[in-house]
Image (cartoon, helix red, strand yellow):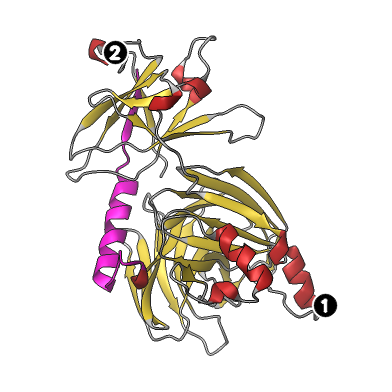
C-alpha cells in the first residue's frame, strides 16, 4: 500500500544510537492512527527526502527498529529506471495507536536479515508470451500479443483476453519458474495440484480477477492483449511492472490504457493503477464462472467480492477501491459465454484509476469461509483509507 509522507524538522535525541552505537544516517517515525495493530503493510520513503550526506550511499544502509535494535528486511526500487534507486520500502509492525522509530544505519553483512525474493514477476516467452507475477500468497498472469495473434490467425494454443488469470498457490515459496519449467516437459503440468496449488481458474474473455472494461449504454467494451511490458522491480517486499495496450474502441470512444501493477509481500491483492483516457470511469470485474457463487457489494467500505464453489474447494475474489472512488457495484449476468462479471465502477481522477484486486483460496488455509474473506477485505479497506503516517526526521 502507498502511504502519504508528512515531514518535520524535529529531531528526537533518543533516535541517535544504533545496535553498535553508530549514529544513524536518518530516522523515520511511523504512526498508526487506527485502534487495531498493523503489519504486512509496505511503507514507501522517497530517497531524495532522506537528505543523506554525499558520502552515505542508500545501498549501504539498513532499516533498524530503534526500540528493539532489530534489522528489518528492506528493498530499494528504481521507479523511473534511470539506474538510481528512488524509493526505500520496508514493513513496520505497530500496535494500535502506536508510534515507532526506525533508523537508517550501517551494519555488517552478518547482521542483515536473510532475504528471499518472494515478490517476483517476469515476461514468459516460453509459454507464448504471458506476463506472470506472485508473492508468498497468490499468483497471477495475463496474456501478450503473440497469444492474440495466434487466435486471430487460427493457430491452436493462443489466448485472446485482457482478463487477469489467478494461479492458486498454497505454498509461500515462489512457484512461477518451477511451474512453467515443469510444463515444458509435461504439457499442462500446472493444471494439476501436486501439493503446491494449480491453475484451474478459467478466464476466457471474462475480466478474471480485476481486468477492466468501459461501459457504453448497456455494453461493456474491453481491450485486447497487452502489447508491451516493462518490469520495474522484484524482491522480498514488492514486484511491480507496466503493461501497455493498443488503443481500443468503446462505442465510438477511443480508449487508451496502461496498467501499472504492483504486488507486495503478505497481500492477497495486487495494486492496479490504470492510466486511461477517453472515459471518466472504468469497470473492474470479477468473473462469475458457473454463476453458483454469492456476490457482495459494500459501497461504504469500497469493495466488491465474489465467493464461489471452485472444483473441490471454494474461492473468494475481490476488488477494493480506496479514497471513496467506488461509484457503484454492478452484477452483470448474461448468457454470453464468460461475459458475466460483478463489476466495480471506479472514478477516473487526473487520468488515473486505482484499485486492488486479488483472491483467497480455501485450500491455502487462510480464508476458509466467505465471512473470513470479507473480514479481510473490510480490514484491508480500512487500512487503505487510514494509511500509516510517515515522518522523516
Q: Is residue 187 left or right of residue 314?
A: right
| Quadrant location, the C terminus | top left
Q: Is residue 123 left or right of residue 370?
A: right
Label 2 or label 1, whichever lies nearer to me, is 2
Q: Which mark is residue 17?
A: 2
* Whether residue 128 is situated above or below residue 134 in the rendered picture: below
Question: Please, what secondary structure does the residue beneath circle 2 have?
Answer: loop
Q: Is residue 259 in view?
A: no
Q: Which residues are magenta?
A: 364-393
- Position in image of residue 161 (x %, y %): 64, 71
Q: Earlier in the sequence, mark 2 or mark 1?
A: 2
Residue where numbered disc 1 is placed? 153
- Position in image of residue 135 (x %, y %): 46, 53
Q: Residue at x 50, y 13 (%)?
A: 56
Density class for disc 1 (Cα within 10 Å; few <14, some 14-19, many ≥20) is few
Which quadrant of the figure has residue 5?
top left
* Whether residue 79 is situated above or below residue 289 in the rendered picture: above
Q: Is residue 328 left or right of residue 13?
A: right
- Position in image of residue 319 (x %, y %): 42, 62
Q: Is residue 255 left or right of residue 281?
A: right
Q: Is residue 366 magenta?
A: yes
Q: Residue at x 39, y 18 (%)?
A: 105
Q: Is residue 46 magenta?
A: no
Amino acid at each position: 500500500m502507498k502511504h502519504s509522507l508528512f515531514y518535520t524538522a524535529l529531531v528526537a535525541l533518543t533516535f541517535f544510537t544504533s545496535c553498535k552505537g553508530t549514529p544513524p544516517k536518518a530516522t523515520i517515525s511511523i504512526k498508526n492512527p487506527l485502534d487495531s495493530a498493523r503489519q504486512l503493510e509496505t511503507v514507501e520513503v522517497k530517497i531524495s527526502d532522506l537528505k543523506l550526506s554525499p558520502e552515505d550511499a542508500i545501498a549501504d544502509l539498513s532499516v533498524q527498529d530503534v526500540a528493539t535494535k532489530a534489522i528489518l528486511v528492506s528493498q530499494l526500487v528504481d521507479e523511473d529506471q534511470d539506474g538510481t534507486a528512488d524509493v526505500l520500502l520496508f514493513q513496520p509492525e505497530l500496535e494500535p495507536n502506536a508510534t515507532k522509530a526506525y533508523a537508517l544505519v550501517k551494519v555488517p553483512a552478518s547482521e542483515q536479515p536473510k532475504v528471499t525474493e518472494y515478490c517476483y514477476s517476469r515476461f514468459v516467452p516460453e509459454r507464448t508470451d504471458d506476463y506472470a507475477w506472485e508473492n508468498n500468497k497468490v499468483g497471477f498472469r495475463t496474456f501478450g500479443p503473440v497469444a492474440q495473434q495466434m487466435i486471430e490467425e487460427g493457430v491452436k494454443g493462443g489466448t485472446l483476453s485482457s482478463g487477469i488469470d489467478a494461479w492458486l498457490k498454497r505454498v509461500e515459496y515462489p512457484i512461477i519458474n518451477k511451474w512453467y519449467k515443469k510444463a515444458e516437459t509435461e504439457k499442462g503440468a500446472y493444471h494439476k495440484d501436486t501439493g503446491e496449488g494449480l491453475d484451474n481458474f478459467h478466464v476466457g474473455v471474462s475480466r478474471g480477477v480485476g481486468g477492466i472494461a468501459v461501459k457504453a449504454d448497456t455494453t461493456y467494451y474491453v481491450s485486447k492483449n497487452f502489447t508491451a511490458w516493462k518490469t520495474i522491480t522484484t524482491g522480498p517486499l514488492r514486484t511491480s511492472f507496466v503493461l501497455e495496450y493498443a488503443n481500443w474502441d468503446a462505442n465510438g470512444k477511443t480508449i487508451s490504457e496502461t496498467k501499472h501493477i504492483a504486488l507486495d509481500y503478505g497481500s492477497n491483492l495486487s495494486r492496479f493503477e490504470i492510466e486511461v483516457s477517453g472515459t471518466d470511469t472504468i469497470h473492474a470485474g470479477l468473473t462469475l464462472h458457473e454463476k453458483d457463487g454469492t456476490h457482495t457489494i459494500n459501497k461504504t467500505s469500497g469493495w466488491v467480492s465474489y465467493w464461489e464453489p471452485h472444483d473441490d474447494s471454494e474461492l473468494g475474489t475481490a476488488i477494493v477501491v480506496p479514497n471513496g472512488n467506488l461509484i457503484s457495484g454492478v452484477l452483470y449476468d448474461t448468457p454470453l459465454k464468460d461475459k458475466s462479471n460483478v463489476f466495480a465502477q471506479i472514478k477516473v481522477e487526473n487520468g488515473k484509476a486505482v484499485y486492488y484486486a486479488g483472491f483467497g483460496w480455501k485450500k491455502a488455509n487462510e480464508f476458509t469461509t466467505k465471512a473470513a474473506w470479507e473480514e479481510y477485505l473490510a480490514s484491508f479497506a480500512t487500512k487503505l483509507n487510514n494509511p500509516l503516517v510517515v515522518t522523516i526526521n
